[in-house]
Image (cartoon, coloured by chain):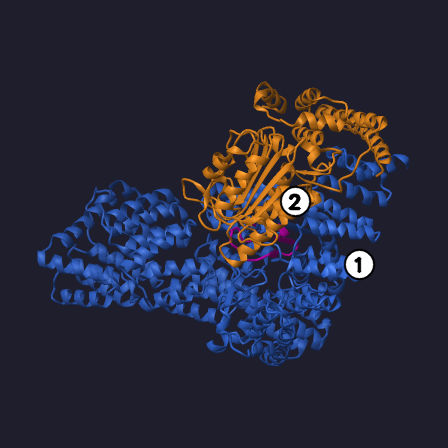
Chain colours: A orange, B blue
Amino acid sequence: MDFEEVMEDRMSKSDQFSFPAFGPAAGRAAGVLTANTVRVGVAALLLACPWSATAQIIEQEIGEGQIGEEASSGGDTYAVVISGLGGDPDYAKMIDGWGKDLSTALNSGGVAPERLYWLSEKKTPDSYAEASRERVQQLLRKLEQEVKPEDIFQLYLIGHGSYDGYEYRFNIPGPDFSAEELGGWLQGISSERQLIVNMTSASGAAIIPLRKKGRALITSTAAGQERNFSVFARYFVAAVQDDASDADKNQAISSLEAYRYATREVARYYESMKRLATEHATIEDLGDSDGAREATPETGQGLLAAAIVVRRLGQARASADTPQIRRLRARKLTAEEAIEQLKYAKASMETGEYFQKLEQLLVNLAQIQARLDELEGQ
Amino acid sequence: MRLKQIAPGPQQPGIRPAVTGKRIIGAMLACLLFGSATTQAAFEEELNLYRQGKYGEAVGRLEDSLARGQDVAGALPLLLAILIETGEYEPARDRGLRYLENQSAPEGRIEVSIQVARALIALGEYAEAEALAGPIDTPESLWLRGTLADRRGERAVADEMYSRAAGGVSEIASLGVSGQLGVVDSLIALGQYREANDLFRALTELHPANPEIKARWGRLMARKHNPGDAEALFGEALQMNPRHPGAVMGMAELAAGGWDNKAVELIEQALAVNPQLTEARLLSAGIYLEQEKYNEVAGQLDAVDRVNPNSLEAWSYRAALEYLSDNDAEADNQWIERVLAVNPGYGKVFELIGDFLVIRRQYKEAGVFYQRALDLDDRLEDARSHLGINLFRLGEEEQARRVLEAAYDRDPFNIWTVNTLRLMDSFSQFDSFETDRFRVKLHQKESKLLRPYVEEILDESLTSLTTRYKYTPPVKVIFEMYPNHEDFAVRTLGLPGLGALGASFGPVVAMDSPAARATGEFHWGSTLWHELAHVITLGITANRVPRWFTEGLSVYEEAHARPGWGDPMTMGLVQALQTHGLVPMSELNGVFVRPQYPNQVVFAYFQSGMICEFIIEQHGFGKILEMLQAYRDRKNDEEVFREVLGTGLEDFDSQFREFAREKTYGFAAAVELDMEPDLHEGMHVEMHEPEGGESGEDTPEGVEISVLPDDPSDQPSVPEDFLGKLRQAAEFREEGEFDRAMELAEEAKAQFPLYAGIGNPYELLANIYLAQDNKQAALEQLQEWFHQRGRNPETFRKLADLQAELGRKPDAIRTLEESLQVSMFSVETHETLGRWLLESEDSDKAVREFRAVLEMDPADKAQAHYRLATAYWELSDRANAREQVLTALEIAPGYRDAQKLLLQLREQ
């Protein structure tokens, strides 16, 4: 099945797609499109663009030119980071450090402090609470009341996981909790776009209990049998911290971009150590699959993950909203669409001709952007 | 001595020989099996004693039986077999002959005749053996006759004998054990290995308690390159008879083939049972020959002569000995001529010489001998395989493939052939390119990344070495890098499992690529330089340079190539020095082939390097060139040292010992790895031996040490030794007692300044200085670490950052460039280096770095293309800048910086 067939197949099952917050955000960003027209536009692009470009467009639709995280979905982002039991001082220090670093990076990337919760092995001045079963449950019950359908909910698990052949358990102070239990606790969270990143050993066993429509799920291992300590967390946290993971330079790091960055660096880590990789990260955002190691048209994974921003780069800026700026933004969107359509046609074009046309379009876009920057005071 | 023609007894006309033999054996067995119950029981006991290796006891009982006149026909052959197995060849011969002369009854004559023939063969009395076995047509006798015809080079006759013996396979169950073994050995001689293997399997089921069958089956396995199963079979044989000479020798050959010194011990075990075992003497001679202990070789061959003065194998070893001693004429005129006079088709003599020339790295000459071997005997399958591998080593790839494919057709079991052909097949995944002086092969997955770095060092090293050594290779040097270490191992030896990093076959160099080893483990530039030095020294001497000298010079050259290059000093070397001391010059070469302890090869490299340093310091580099010329002129170590350096080897040993003492013994005493246990209390020392360190090739850095503090309560209060001081310094640092930590670290550093491995004092001190915000002092410590050949990539980065921060950008750039020697695949390093080079207006090199980033599949591809575009922009290379910026924007159309550059390009 080639790409076009894949996409047609997918579009024929369009009810499987769920991008609940596209409309308001994109409409507001572009200033001219309605919720419906954006959906149609995205659908058209899905047919017309290579996968990465599709994901990129979706992300741009949601995030480009927004003010802080709130504008991206029309709602707020809630993030819960749980760093579990270390087991020994070295692991404890590492796990705690990753939890703290991730919280800091999320905060710097647009998650408001009042909606950011870090639960650590031991309660510290920086953390919200101890990562015990009771405190996790309490927090999730609290969030059930606060999180709205248009909000984004993100949950990050860092530490040791275990799998006994029957169920996955996350190791925390006091009694552990299982993936099934966590799935139950999350039932009340009404956010229609959710992200769970389980960076623990054996986390692959948590895919089935936690997968759900509208939820992007990332695990650091492909199966419960991958029980060795996972280094995925180190690189996922680095991805959120590192501007370099913003592969499409849209000033926002999506969870898909962070996933790709982390998996690439994990592979590089094992290769550089000449060790056999004992973990294989997996992504699942269809809600009903076993997940895949790569987000591609063939695997069908990655669309939702591409639409969930984990960190926004640069300072929030107040953008002017004059008729001229609105016109330029509309022209910019058109220019971007033209570029994506050209990229899709690349395979059928002669290289020289392709780059000539690409250059024209890119120059046009660059000129529009330069003018926009001028008007927006950058 | 000559023997009277003794007929084995009357044969009935009209009976097919094999059947005749079978009937006679049957009669013999019947006699053995169906004699009186008492006699039979006694015989079974004696047979069991024999099979259990209780030779003396068995002989005593058999002698008693014979003295009592009981079952002479059955007991005597067994007695003779035991005498032969224990090396009593002459008594066996004489006893048997007496019996045959005096006994007219047919019972037992054939078995006795065969045993006598075996004794005669062992004694080299081949004609007499032929006369005795000739009239007998049992499978065992036919096989013996086949071997005798083979020895004379009468292949057709031999094949006929083997074929007739092998015909017995259809009636194998009715044959006795010796007949069955005659059949199976004939199948092997005919090259029918699968059939032989099947038959061995059946025979072991028929005779589960017979060690001889297991041992011979093991030999077949070993011959067909299956050492695992061979060892298991030898093991089973030895469980039945722990002294079984065949099984012990089988084990010895396996050990010798794996360069395991256990071979010597096993040979001694075999000789303890059979002091006349020429096979053991020959294997021993081979081991001595590898070690270049020529007197010992001659001693072993003399011992063979005393048993069998007509051994073609021994004469072949004599020829090899003369060749390796540079007495070519002696080898040709005396030994080879003598061998060929007996057997004009005895190609094995040339194969043997070829094998030893390979060990001496004289690949071209070895190839000539292998070809001569095949010209005489095209059934020498191993020689064909070795010829192909040698051609491959010499860069004659196409011809090598043809020969190896022919070898594979004839012997698909040969793992060297198979591995090498597989490697050749994988060359489709390699990129090949030529420069003015090199033909390079790099794997496609890393070729674009590595090429500029590899080309630079290839060029730099060859230029430097050709200038210093006044020698230019006459042909382009073939250089290959393998990202999979096992591919390199196969390239080098034909087998995986080699611990070396690089190998030079003259004008052909193969080595691990930086991807073949873990980050920080392998300084690939040093290895490359080391191997290129071999190209020079092998070239100057026509591959006659002794191993110690070529390795020593390579070690010396890599260490002087650039600051921080060369093998770091390790605890393992210090320990080897402490425990075993220096190797005398006269033994140094042999250590590379057959080390006496696990880490000795690494130590031999170190010592050889130090010897070269000593010669250069004492006599000047010019003497090195003179020495190389002398080796080219076929002079040996003793002659070269006397003529060029004016000293004998023993005197040189004394002079060098003083030099080495000054250079290293101080450290050895300070580190005191083998001191009393109480001083080591609390210190867990992990020694890691390099994999396959006994291979005789260039090994990794060698033993590394992990200094892991144990429970602090166990620590001595005032450590005197290096490790103790380091350990306590680290503890003090953890506790924030910086002054005490620094004092101890400085003391440790003074004791053993060459140590830059894990837990070294330099990094410890630098970290303390950084904690105190004394960046300059930290920088100085790390610079020392670098000069002492530190290898930790993170420390390289720390040093570079400090240099950059303190305004020494050119130094920082050099440090990062050097870090690529131990960590080529760091995106971050290449990115930083690219940016710094761009800032330093070295856009050419910046392009190289940004290209490298792109080759490593970076997370931020758009940025990588953009940065490459900026470097091209700085070089005014508009076309490439445009291509790169368009690619960046193709990935990320909204990338502001790239958009700006695109507009700049348009405006230009």
Q: Quadrant of the N terminus of chain B?
A: bottom left
Q: Residue furthest right?
A: B908
| Quarter location, residue B99 | bottom left
Judge by depth and name the residue closer to the eye, A260 or B433.
A260
Give the x, y percent position of residue B162: 34, 46
Q: Is residue A294 visible?
A: no
Judge by depth and name the residue closer to the eye, B782 or B509.
B782
- Whether residue B322 sits left or right of residue A261 in the image: it is left
- Look at the picture and state if B19 lies above or below B111: above
Q: Please tell me if label 2 and label 1 are on a single chain.
A: no
| Quarter location, residue B636 | bottom right
**Residue B512 in magenta?**
yes
Tell me the amino acid under the disc marked 2: Pro
| Quarter location, residue B647 | bottom right
Residue at 55% x, 39% y is: A142
Between disc 2 and disc 1, the foreground one is: 2
| Badge number at residue B809 | 1
User: Badge 2 is on which residue?
Assistant: A113
Determine the secondary structure under disc 2: helix
Tell me the amino acid under the disc marked 1: Lys
- Look at the picture and state if A131 lies above or below B3: above
How many numbered tags mark residues here? Answer: 2
Residue at 79% x, 25% y is: A330
Q: Is residue A22 visible?
A: yes
- Identify the magenta region: B490-515
- Give the chain of mark 2: A
**Residue A298 in magenta?**
no
